[in-house]
Amino acid sequence: MRAVFVGAAMVFAMSIPAISGPSGGSHGSDHGAGHGMDHSAMMTAGMPGNKAEARRAIRVKMKETDDGEMIFTPNSFNVKKGETVRIKISNRGELEHEFVLDTRENNQIHKELMAKRPDENAHQMPNAITLQPGEKGEIVWTFSNAGEFEFACLILGHYESGMFGTASVS
């Protein structure tokens, strides 16, 4: 009986990102298919934006520090509800890193799925991008809901090394 309940709970937990909508950007290969996540609808943090409507850019650097931390600089930013921004991301580190924008809860679910399938870490989602050392990329995003959202690197061990931050939408 307990195994059936745990199995049902896992199926429900894995469906949460599909219920809340997509997560997305250029993120490598087809990650959604491997994890059963639907990233096609608007998600809690917003939706892919139109580059022509973006009035400002937020620059975010990803890197490792000499003391072993992995960080985003800045590790927080503020936007207004309804605002479309270009998030320009650069990997200044020596390792592959990613930027995934979502709720903290959805990022935790996603991180757990990635830990179970480390060979399927590359993905295509409008709210995410994976960059090799020295690469640059961008996510154009419209923040359609107010609240606190998280951006994080969900590659195994990176989140635990400090690679997460906050997007505050007012």
Image (cartoon, grey):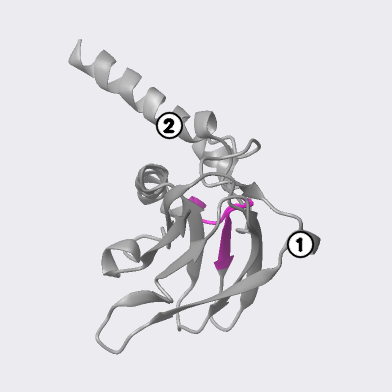
Label 2 Cα neighbours within 10 Å, binned few <14 / some 14-19 / many ≥20? some
Element type at mark 2: helix
Residue type at mark 2 is: Met
Tell me the quarter of the picture where residue 9 sits.
top left
Instruction: Write the residue at 37% across / 48% down.
Output: 104
Tell me the quarter of the picture where residue 95 sits.
bottom left
Which circle marks residue 14 in the picture?
2
Residue 77 at x, y percent in the picture: 46, 67
Span of residues in magenta:
120-130
Residue 168 to residue 86: above or below: above
Q: How many angstroms separate mark 2 from mark 1 (CA)?
A: 31 Å
Residue 46 magenta-highlighted: no
Residue labelled with disc 1: 51
Instruction: Write the residue at 23% across / 18% down.
Output: 3
In the image, 1 versus 102, the foreground residue is: 102
Extreme residue in the right direction: 52
Instruction: Write the residue at 38% across / 64% down.
Output: 165
Residue 133 at x, y percent in the picture: 53, 80
In the image, 118 versus 50, the foreground residue is: 50
Residue type at mark 1 is: Lys
Left or right of residue 94, residue 140 in this image: right
Label 1 Cα neighbours within 10 Å, binned few <14 / some 14-19 / many ≥20? some
Residue 140 at x, y percent in the picture: 67, 60
Residue 134 at x, y percent in the picture: 57, 84
